[in-house]
Image: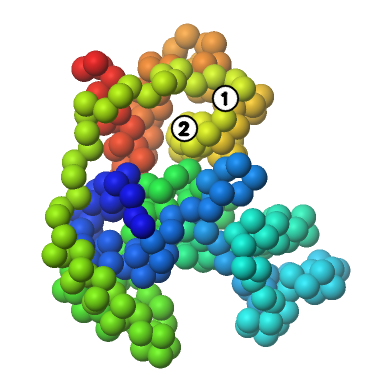
Amino acid sequence: MIDTATRQAIAAQARRLGCEEAALLAVIEVESAGKVYAKVDGRNEPLIRFEGHYFDRRLSGSKRAKARAAGLANPKAGAVANPRSQAARWKMLNDAIEIDAKAAMESVSLGLGQVMGAHWAWLGYASVEAMVNVARSGVPGQVELMVRYIEKAGLAGALRRRDWHAFAKGYNGPAHAKWGYHTKMADAYRRHARGAPTPPADRRAAKPAATVLKRGMLGSRIAELQTALTRAGHMVTADGSFGPATERAVLAFQKAAGLTVDGVAGRQTLEALAKAGGTKGPQSVWMRLLHDFLSWLRRS
């Protein structure tokens, strides 16, 4: 089931595409089966599928031999089976990363739209790690990634027209009809179009418990902070753990922005991060949500 927060992120991106919310929601439902993340080692992670033939293609010499011996690479598509559980798939990815991190991350499809990591440059990301971090930052990041692919692949028009055959052919490939992607999307669209529109965010909701992010904290808000720091030019892995590396990134950002340099991300630091992220091109869904959140804080 797709929850309210996910529907709100979808609504924002539907406006960006100029399509009906129900149309984008239908695609996401079919591609993700309504599941937006899996719990792996206590953290919400995007769904992934590891493609061993992609990995094989990106390796050579001793690395390829090692990956093949470990059952992680094969020149034949589908020869490397994916485990049923997402936890096992993430372990597979981490094992592949030990051999070659870039090749491994390029060899997974991830998120709501199951976008291949190999598309990172085509989609305009600075690196494959940056793309993976966006997907790991939360549901808005996953939706942003999927919509970026839809735009780049020239499928926005088909989605606006609700031409499910053309959209599924472009998104899922020529075998889409065999698996009925177009009919599933059409059915999902009709169901969502009949339903009530996505409710707006409730600004009367309880204030989040933590308005200051600091060392030792864990969770999705930390991952969002880390993603914002990276977008502002202070690279840090979005692992959801506020450790020494994140503290150093916060300190560096605060110094560059002329803020109090204390390594703690409070309201002023978050506001400055939102502004810094907004100067580098079209705002991401997350940045817009952050602006809304900060505006709500100021009114409280």
Residue 26 spot, x, y in % from top left: 28, 67
Residue 140 spot, x, y in % from top left: 37, 47
- Compared across the picture, whether 133 is left or right of 7 comes to right
Q: Camera-side residue: 297 or 226?
A: 297
Q: Residue at x 31, y 78 (%)?
A: 184
Residue 261 spot, x, y in % from top left: 52, 11
Residue 280 spot, x, y in % from top left: 37, 39
**Kind of residue sitting beneath label 1:** Met
Q: Residue at x 29, y 74 (%)?
A: 185
Q: Quadrant of residue 112?
A: bottom left
What mark, if any, has residue 217 been given in the picture?
1
- Compared across the picture, whether 22 is left or right of 39 comes to left
Element marked by disc 2:
helix
Q: CA distance from mark 2 to mark 1?
A: 9 Å
Q: Quadrant of residue 177?
A: bottom left
10 Å crowding of disc 1: few (<14), some (14-19), many (20+): some
Element marked by disc 1:
loop
Q: Residue at x 43, y 55 (%)?
A: 36
Q: Is residue 113 above or below residue 137?
A: below
**Kind of residue sitting beneath label 2:** Arg
Q: Quadrant of residue 17?
A: bottom left
Q: Camera-side residue: 223 or 170?
A: 223
Q: Is residue 102 above or below residue 134?
A: below
Q: Which residue is mark 2?
A: 221
- Compared across the picture, whether 262 is left or right of 282 comes to right
Residues at marks 2 and 1 touching, judged by CB atoms closer than 8 Å: yes
Q: Camera-side residue: 178 or 58?
A: 178
